[in-house]
Image (tube, helix red, strand yellow):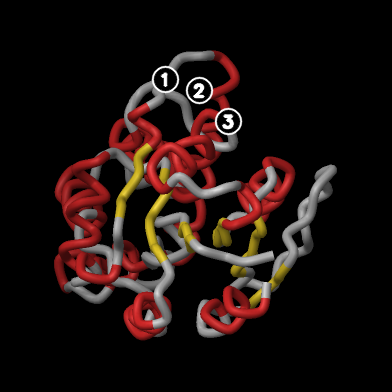
Amino acid sequence: MTIKTCIFDAYGTLFDVSAAARQAATEPAFAQIADSWATLAQDWRQKQLQYTWLRAVTGAHDDFWQVTQDGLDWAMEAAGLQDQTELRQRLLDLYWELAAYPEVPAMLRALKDAGYETGILSNGSPKMLAGAVESANLGDTLDAVLSVETVGVFKPSARVYDLVGERFGTRKSEVLFVSSNGWDAGCAAGYGFVTAWVNRAGEPIDRLPWRPAHVLTDLQPIPEIAANA
């Protein structure tokens, strides 16, 4: 088996989705979340994902920016912050500037130097992804940024995973797909990709019919995995 293309989920995989709440919590204007930002970030992310699944199942698609706002509104109400309009706007603004995880730039550069094609496959809308890639200065290490908006349904629809072959012309077995979401890595394995789950939080593996081939704590091993897959 030869890997030719390395594809990454974006949010939580390359970009730290907790960074917006963590940054806001350090700013004097938003001291009210100084001790609770981690719970706010976790609830925001969980609802964001849940709403993508529900929209995919029901066919009620909307873009990821709307889903992101809906998830934040739920999380803020759960925290008793629903009237904090300035905080809400600050969190949304910061979401366009999410930091990449520390190992990401060097990992992507190593893949490019080794001759692999690289790309993002994300639920994110094209504008959101462009903003994140630009903010993290990753543009020169990515060959493509693929959004589910092309097909109008969220992961884990096979129509989303199909975008990789359509763009790169690779067979499923030639793709290493990397995600921080266990369900995404599992479903992509069922689709036929070689998959790696970046399990930064040490969570149990999802009970699905398929399992990722590799489970990692960060992205540093990806070039070696690609070379030996």
Coordinates of residue 22 in the picture (x, y in percent): 33, 70
The reply to whether the C-beta atoms of the residues labelled 3 and 1 are less than 8 Å apart is: no
Q: Mark 1 or mark 2: which comes first in sequence?
A: 2
Asked if residue 6 lies left or right of residue 137, the reply is: right
Q: Mark 3 or mark 1: which comes first in sequence?
A: 1
Q: Amino acid at mark 3?
A: Ser
The reply to whether the C-beta atoms of the residues labelled 2 and 3 are less than 8 Å apart is: no
**Depicted 217 relative to depicted 172: above or below:** below
Coordinates of residue 119 in the picture (x, y in percent): 38, 57
Disc 1 from disc 2: Cα separation = 5 Å
Specify the quadrant that holds the N terminus. Answer: bottom right
- Is residue 228 or residue 119 the one in the foreground? 228
Q: Mark 2 or mark 3: which comes first in sequence?
A: 2
* Residue annotated with mark 1: 61
| Marking on residue 212 | none
Asked if residue 207 lies left or right of residue 127, the reply is: right
Disc 2 from disc 3: Cα separation = 11 Å
Residue at 71 percent across and 66 percent down: it is 203
Residue at 56 percent across and 14 percent down: it is 58
- Is residue 155 or residue 143 the one in the foreground? 143
Mark 2 vs mark 3: give the one in front: 3
Q: Amino acid at mark 2?
A: Arg
Mark 1 falls on what kind of element? loop
| Marking on residue 157 | 3
Asked if residue 165 lies left or right of residue 149, the reply is: right
Coordinates of residue 95 in the picture (x, y in percent): 26, 55
The reply to whether the C-beta atoms of the residues labelled 1 and 2 are less than 8 Å apart is: yes
Coordinates of residue 72 in the picture (x, y in percent): 36, 43
Residue at 56 percent across and 56 percent down: it is 175
Mark 3 falls on what kind of element? loop
| Marking on residue 55 | 2
